[in-house]
Amino acid sequence: MSAVLDELVNLLSLERIEENLFRGQSQDLGWGQVFGGQVLGQALSAAAQTVPSDRPVHSLQAYFLRPGDAARPIVYDVDRSRDGQSFTTRRVVAIQGGKPIFHLSASFQTDEPGFEHQDTMPDVPGPEGLRSELEMWTEHKDKIPRRMHARVLSERPIELRAVDPMDVFNPTATAPNHSIWVKATSTLPDDPPLHRYLLAYCSDFSFIPTALRPHGASWVDPTLQVASIDHAMWFHRPFRMDDWLLHVMESPSASGSRGFVRGRFYDRQGRLVASTAQEGLMRRRPPA
């Protein structure tokens, strides 16, 4: 396992400090602030550790309240909201410096047979032959401000390969759609909860950039302020994060300085394994 992925896996395991209290450290990807996907994965891990192992998570709803400091630990306070015959519900508050920075509600369910149907996976090129996001950033290194080098050129725990990459330094208006292949950079243990935490982690990639596409705008534009506001996710079928998954995203609306995006995760066999949705801030900064 690569060092950066091993570090992320350890961060997602958390330290239990009381029955319903957990502490997590952060992985600084060059932003200084905590990556939203990290606190999402850690909060899900905290909730799952208070639920019987035969009840996997099937849905989560979350709000990003404040930026997190990557140099300080985060405390996760789990409220055991409900333990039913088939469903278990948990609410998690992530706290840093005495203030909540994130809220998550998650629902867990025993495995049950039932009706099945799904959307068909779109016909797109596979990950083979596509360049990774890191390769594309490295190719344009001379265009990247020095202050952003650590952010975009560092090793990643998750490899990203866009089906339809955009030149972020010279964006042009396109349809509000985006598809990207994602995979952990090394083989992972046979631990289904870990794979779900990691999918929650990487589900925060590329949402706001998808909503910016029809406006010919890019998050590297210093006049733009972008941030995740809320996030929802539904887990449908088993999957592995050390095999390629396709995240298909579309943005049906942007208004009020907010962009809305919904997505679907498919495995290589075309099974719909998870669905996602997010609304993010897309605001022009006032002139200095």
Image (cartoon, rainbow, N blue to C red):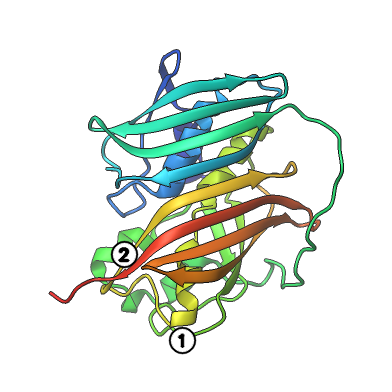
Q: Give the amino acid type for the residue marked by disc 2 in the picture.
A: His
Q: Position of residue 29 (x, y in %)?
A: 36, 51
| Side of 39 where 275 appears, left or right | right
In this rendering, the answer to whether 130 lies above or below 67 is below
Q: Nearer the viewer, residue 117 or 74?
A: 117
Q: Is residue 245 visible?
A: no
Q: CA distance from mark 1 to mark 2?
A: 24 Å
The secondary element bearing badge 2 is classed as helix
Residue carrying label 2: 149
The secondary element bearing badge 1 is classed as loop
Q: Nearer the viewer, residue 257 or 172?
A: 257
Q: Which mark is residue 172?
A: 1
In this rendering, the answer to whether 122 lies above or below 45 is below
The mark nearer the N terminus, 1 or 2, is: 2
| Side of 90 where 230 appears, left or right | left
| Side of 41 where 276 appears, left or right | right
Q: Which mark is residue 196?
A: none
Q: Give the amino acid type for the residue marked by disc 1 in the picture.
A: Thr
Work out which quarter of the rendered image holds the C terminus and state it.
Answer: bottom left
Are the residues flagged by discs 1 and 2 in contact, CB closer than 8 Å?
no
Quadrant housing residue 257: bottom left
- Residue at figure coordinates x 31%, y 64% from the top left: 149
In this rendering, the answer to whether 146 lies above or below 151 is below
